[in-house]
Image: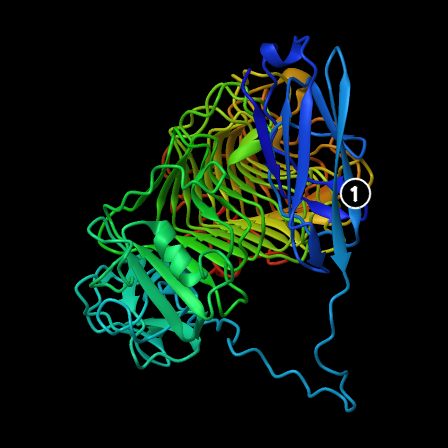
Amino acid sequence: MKNITILLACLLAGTQLGCTQSLSPQSNSQTLTATPPTATITTTPSTVTAGQSIVLKWTVTNATSVTINGEKKALTGLTLGIPSKSTSFTLVATNSTKSVTAVATVTVKAATQTTPPPTTPPPTTPPPTTPPPTTGSTTAGAPHIDYTDINVGSGTGGDNGNGAYVRIFGDHFGTSQGSSTVKLGGNLVTDCSLCSWSNTAIIAQLGSAATTGSLQVTVDGLPSNGYPFTVAPTTIVFVSAKGLDTNTGTFSAPFKTWRAAFNSLTSKDNSSPAQNAIIYLEPGVAVNVDDGRGYNATVSTDLGGSSPTKQLAIVGYPGGTVNVGSTSVANGIHGWGKYLTIANLTIIGGNSAIDDEAGNVRIINNSLSCPAPPAGLGGTACVLGETGTPTDTWVFQGNNVNNTGGNVDKTYHAVYFSSNVNHADVGWNNIGQNFKGYCRSIMFHATTGANLYDLHVHDNVITGGYCDGIGFASVDPSKGVVEAYNNVLSHIALASNPYGVANEVGIAVNSDPAGSSSGTVQVYNNTVVDAGQYTTGNQNGCFGVVTAGAGLVLTNNICSQTSSAEPYIESGSQNVSGTNNLWFGAGTSPSWDARPVSTNPAFVSTTNFDLQSNSPALKAGSTSKLSTTDILGDVHPNPPAIGAYE
C-alpha cells in the first residue's frame, strides 16, 4: 500500500484547525485493511513569533479516517497557517483494527516591540501615491482602458533599458497607433521591436519619462479614462530556454528555469524580494514538470511580494506563447505568496491551473485549462482561490478559462473563490470555450468562515456549465457590495448534469446557512440566454434566490429563454425585485418588475447577443443602477439600453 503524505498549511484560530481542503476519495485498498495504522505529525517551525506562519505536515498509512483535534480531515489539502497562540495538534488515525495517536505542538511567542511608542501624535497619513482613475471623454467611440497586466514597474532596465513592458487592454484604441498617444506622465515607448497597437490592446514600455499616476490613451483628441499605475524601482530577470541557472538573470544572461529566477529574488525562498520584481518567462521556456517543492505544482509560489508597490510578478514576455504546467502535474501554479501578479501565460493543470491559497493576488490575461481532471474530483476548480485573511484582495481579469472539465463531482467548478475571499474584482473573462464538464462557471462559496462580500463580477462572457453561471452561493451584501453587471451568459445550466441535482440558474444568490445574511445583491445590465434546461427539482431559470437571506434586485437585464420550461425566475425565490428588465420566451413577465419589456430583444444573431438597431431594448433602461460603460467600453446614453450592450 502506498503511503499517503499530506502537507497542510492551515489558518489556525486558537486550538481549532479550521481550513478548506481539496478532497480526494479514498481507494478500496484504504477502506478494507487489517494492518494497524501508523501516523506522524510535525509543525515547521515548532516555535514562531506571533503573526508568522507554519506548515503542519502529517504522514498516515493504513487508515480509513483521520482527525485532528476531533475534526475529520481529508486526505489532501493546502492553505496558509498562522497560529494565534501556542497550540497542540492531536492526530488520530483509525481503521477497523486499531486507532493510533500522534501529537505536534507549536509554541507562539509574543512579538517584540523594537521601537518605543510615539510620545507625540503620529503625522497625518498622506494621500495614496497612485491617484484614482479619471473618467475620460464621454463622447461616443472614445477610448476606454479596462485593465493592465502589471500595475507596478520601472522605466529603466529590462531588455533594452526602457524598463518593464505594460499591456493595456480596452476598447476603441484604433487599429494602429497613428497620431494616438499613451501617457503616464510622459509618453510611453511605443516604437520598440515588441511593441504593438490594436483596437483592444497596446503593448508598450514604460520608458524614462513615466511617472506614478494614471495611464491614459488619447485617440483623435479624445482621452480615455485614467488607469492607476505606480512607477517604482524594479528588479527584472529573464528565463529562457537558452539560459543557464548559473547566469545572473539579465536579458543577455538569462536563467534557464523559473525556480532559479525565483531563488535569485527571494534569497533561495527565505524572504520576499527587496523591491518590486518581475520574472519574465520567454516563449519556449520549459515549465512543465513538478518543481520539487512538495506542492504538486510546476510553479510553487512559496513567497510573493511584500506590499502593493513591492510585488512579485510572473509574466509572459511578449512575442509568443509561454506555456506553464502539464496534465501530469496536479497544479500549474500553486502557493501562498501574497502581492503576486500572474499574467500573460498559458497555464494547464491536472487538477487546477491555479490553486492560490493566499490573496492580494492579480491574475491577468492568462489562458487557463484543466482538460483531464481525475474522475470524481471535487472540492476544487480549474482556478481556486481561498485565504485565511478576510482583508486580502483579489483581481481576476481578462482570462480565458477553456477546455476544462470531465467526469467530475458537482463540487468541481471552472472558477471557485472559497473561504474568506472578499474584495474581489472578476471582470472581462471568457469562461467555457470547449466545455468538457464542470458545475459552476464562477462560484463564490465560503467553505469555512463568514459569508462573502465586496464582490464585483462584470463584463464576463460565460457559456456552458452544468450548474449556475455565476453562483453567489454564500454572500452577505449587508457587509459590502455584491454585484454582477455587463455579463453575457448563454447556454448555461445545461440539461446533462451527470452527477445529480445542483442549482442550475444563470445568476444565483444564496445565504449559507439560510437566513444568515441580509441586504440585496445588485444584478444589472446582464444578458442571459437559454439558462436552465435542467429542470429536476425546479432549480432552474435566468435568476434565482436559493434560500432566504440576502435578496436580489434586477435592473436593466435581458432574460431570453427557449420555452416556458426554462422560467425567468427560479421557483421558490424570495425577496426578488427590480425594474426595466426585458423578458422573452417563457411567458408573462414577473409581476414585481415595475417597468418590464416583454418582447423579442432582437439580437444580432443566435450567437451574437449585441442588439440590432431596431431592438426594443435600446433606450429602454433605467438610470437607477448603471455602470459607466457597456461590455464593449461604450458609454451609456440616457436613457441606457437594457442588457450588456448599447
Q: Is residue 33 above or below residue 23?
A: above
The residue lying furthest to the left in this view is 193
In this picture, residue 159 sits left or right of residue 412: left
In this picture, residue 137 sits left or right of residue 571: left
Residue 260 placement (x, y as % from top left):
35, 54
Figure colour scheme: rainbow
Helix, strand or loop at label 1? It is strand
Q: Residue at x 69, y 37 (%)?
A: 447
Q: Is residue 594 visible?
A: no
Q: Residue at x 24, y 61 (%)?
A: 197
Instruction: Tell which of 599 and 421 is nearer to you.
Output: 421
Residue 480, picture quadrant: bottom right
Residue 126, picture quadrant: bottom right
Instruction: Tell which of 527 and 333 is nearer to you.
Output: 333
- The residue identified by callout 1 is 88
Instruction: Tell which of 7 and 611 is nearer to you.
Output: 7
Q: Is residue 507 above or below residue 255?
A: above
Total labels: the figure holds 1
Q: Tag 1: Cα neighbours inside 10 Å, few (<14), some, or many (≥20)?
A: some
Residue 436 placement (x, y as % from top left):
43, 24
The residue lying furthest to the bottom in this view is 120
Quadrant where the N terminus lies?
A: top right
Instruction: Tell which of 450 and 34 is nearer to you.
Output: 34
Amino acid marked by disc 1: Ser
Q: Is residue 5 visible?
A: yes
Residue 269 placement (x, y as % from top left):
48, 56
Residue 187 placement (x, y as % from top left):
29, 78
